[in-house]
Image (spheres, rainbow, N blue to C red):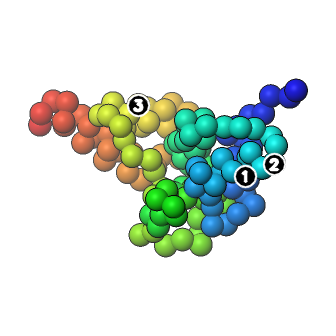
Amino acid sequence: MTKIDVPTRILELLATEEDGYTWKELQLVLRDSCEIRAHHGTISGALSHLHKSLEVFSIKVKRDNCKPYVHAMYRSKYDEKHRIDYPARKNKWESMSDLLYFVMTEDKIPPDAWENALNSYRKMKNV
């Protein structure tokens, strides 16, 4: 049996649906296609990774109490006030490590990366 790369397969599925999928919908699509039986943690982790790498974004309107994730190619379909372009920061170190990653890899630095890093530094130093 061939091992399936879950993030890659999810990205392929999201490319086919401009309204995106929630993790629950992805679980059903993956199961029904007989490819993989993935639990919440696997799918959620893959979506989080894809969101951090800016390959997907989420939208604020929930379906079945879950936020859908949409492939980046459909970004222009959604107004900025309805998109969540960057995942929420879990701790004060993440925004600084994200900024360092973008600087070191010379990728496009997201507009809020500098501000998030500065705010994290201020919180650490109690400035």
Sooner in the amino-acid sequence: mark 2 or mark 3: 2
Q: Are marks 2 and 1 in contact (CB under 8 Å)?
A: yes
Residue under circle 3? 97
Using the rendered image of the protein, determine whether residue 72 is visible from the camera's viewpoint. no
Q: Secondary structure at mark 1?
A: helix
User: Residue 42 appears in which quarter of the rendering?
Assistant: top right
Using the rendered image of the protein, determine whether residue 30 is visible from the camera's viewpoint. yes
User: Residue 31 appears in which quarter of the rendering?
Assistant: top right
Residue under circle 1? 29
Sooner in the amino-acid sequence: mark 3 or mark 1: 1
| Between marks 3 and 1 in the image, the one whose residue lies nearer the viewer | 1
Distance (Cα) linking label 2 and label 1: 6 Å
Relative to 40, say whether 79 is above or below: below
Q: Residue at x 80, y 28 (%)?
A: 3
* 56 displayed left or right of 83: right
Q: Position of residue 87 (x, y in %)?
A: 44, 47
Q: Position of residue 81 (x, y in %)?
A: 41, 69
Mark 2 crowdedness (10 Å alpha carbons): few <14, some 14-19, many ≥20: few
The amino acid beneath tag 2 is Ser
Residue under circle 2? 33
